[in-house]
Image (spheres, helix red, strand yellow):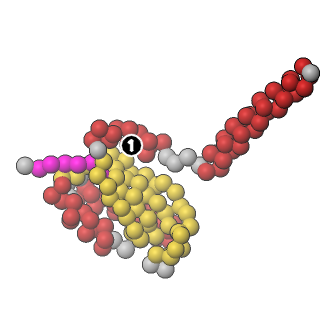
Amino acid sequence: MTQEHVYEGLFILDSEAYARNPEGVSKQLSETVEALGGTIRVSRFWESRKLAYPIKHRTHGSYWLMYFRLDTAKFADLNRQFQLNNNILRFLLVTIDPRIEETVVEHALLGPVKREETKAEEKEAFHDEDDDDDEDVVDAIEEE
């Protein structure tokens, strides 16, 4: 009897290899899962960023996010295949609870929120709150 689980895989890819051949490097990840009988739900580029510390003499990494279904008996083989892939600097595989599978897949399809947008929204909200407070103070002074 086979039992399948949904997994989330977050990969830090070698940015230089990814820049030279983005389709080929990312396709290796999907092909590895599919070769073991898995099915891909989402496979997408997440972001590139400077690493906190060098990994395999690299200071930048390209983050790749993938959700996939796989037979639990094949998980150890998959883990080993990812360890042997020279384009992967680090990776993390996590089992996803089936009750939240659709929600996390939808979220992954939307992509990350840009930090600049988030900061701009926070500033705008902060200024809006300040404006309301200023108006209240002015109203209180005018009433006196």
Location of residue 41 in the rendering, given as x and y in whole percent from the top left corner: 33, 46
The answer to whether 129 is drawn above or below residue 79 in the figure is above
Location of residue 65 in the rendering, given as x and y in whole percent from the top left corner: 41, 54
Does the magenta run of residues contain 5? Answer: yes
The answer to whether 110 is drawn above or below residue 38 in the figure is above
Q: Nearer the viewer, residue 39 or 118?
A: 118
Q: Residue furthest bottom?
A: 57
Location of residue 89 in the rendering, given as x and y in whole percent from the top left corner: 41, 71
Residue appearing at x 29%, y 52% in the figure: 95
Type of the residue with mark 1: Val
Mark 1 secondary-structure assignment? helix
Q: Which of 21 and 87 is in front in this view?
A: 87
* Left or right for 133, reference 59: right
Image quadrant holding the C terminus, namely: top right
Residue named by callout 1: 104
Q: Residue furthest top?
A: 143
Give the quadrant of residue 131: top right
* Left or right for 3, reference 112: left
Residue appearing at x 34%, y 52% in the figure: 8
Q: Which of 136 and 15 is in front in this view?
A: 136
Q: What is the span of residues highlighted in magenta in the rendered image?
A: 2-7
* Residue 60 visible within the image: no
Does the magenta run of residues contain 109? Answer: no
